[in-house]
Image (spheres, helix red, strand yellow):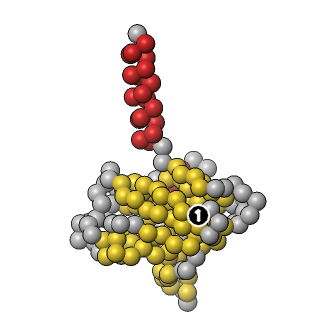
Amino acid sequence: MLKKTLLAAVMMGTSLLANAHDYSVGELHIEHPWSRAMPPVAPTAAAYFVVHNKGQGADRLLSVQTPVAGKAELHEHVHADGVMKMQHVQTVDIPAGGEVKFEPMGYHVMLFNLKQQAKDGERFPLTLTFEKAGKVDVEVAVQSDAPAAEHQHHH
C-alpha cells in the first residue's frame, strides 16, 4: 500500500511540475512564458510572458538570449503617425510592486535567424537578464493560441 501511495504521490508531483510554468528570481516572478506556433518557413518568432515585481525597488530587463535563435531582442509596438509599428528597445523597466506584460501588440521578445520553428506543444529555453535580480532561465511553451485570451475574458 505504501509503495502505491508513494508512486501516486511521485506521479502527481511530476505532473504538477510539468504543468507549473512560472519562474522566480529575486523579487521578480515570471508568469507563463509562451510563443505562438509559426509555419516552418517563418524566419522569426516572438515570445511573451508577464513579469511581476513583488519588491519595493524597480528593476530592469536588460537582455534576452536563446540557443534557438541567432539573435533575440526586446521589442515594443508603438503608434506613430496613426500607424502601428514595432521597434527595438534597449531595456524594459519593471516598476516596484507592479508588472509588465509581454504580449501581442505590446512588449515582446523577437527571435531572429531561427535554427528551426518550434511546433505546438514543444518548449525552448530563454534566458532573461535583469539589472538587479540577475539571470533567470525559463522554458517557453509553444502553443497554437494565445493563453491570455482565455484569462482576459474572465475579468
Query: What residue is at 48 percent from the left and 70 percent from the top?
Result: 64
* Residue at 50% over, 81% down: 88
- Where, by quadrant of the figure, is residue 53 drawn? bottom right
The residue depicted at 35 percent of the width and 66 percent of the height is 67
Residue 84 visible in this rendered orientation of the protein: no
Quadrant occupied by the N terminus: top left
**Residue 128's spot in the image, x, y percent?**
51, 65
Rendering coords of residue 127 (x, y %): 47, 63
Residue reaching furthest to the right? 56
Tell me residue 14's x, y (percent): 41, 35
Compared across the picture, whether 149 is left or right of 4 comes to right
Mark 1 secondary-structure assignment: strand
> How many numbered tags mark residues here?
1
Is 89 rendered above or below residue 103? below
User: Nearest the camera: 153 or 135?
Assistant: 135
Residue that protrudes farthest toward the left in the picture: 41
| Mark 1 crowdedness (10 Å alpha carbons): few <14, some 14-19, many ≥20 | some
Q: Nearer the viewer, residue 79 or 72?
A: 72
Q: Is residue 151 visible?
A: yes
Give the labeled residue for mark 1: 134
Q: Is residue 8 above or below residue 82?
A: above
Give whichever of 74, 10 is nearer the camera.
Answer: 10
Q: Residue furthest toward the bottom?
A: 81
Q: Position of residue 120 (x, y in %)?
A: 31, 54
Q: Residue at x 36, y 54 (%)?
A: 123
Q: Is residue 117 left or right of residue 150?
A: left
The residue lying furthest to the top in this view is: 1
Q: Is 137 on the left or on the right of 53, as rendered? A: left
Question: Which quadrant of the figure has residue 34?
Answer: bottom left
Amino acid type of the residue tagged 1 in the rendering: Gly
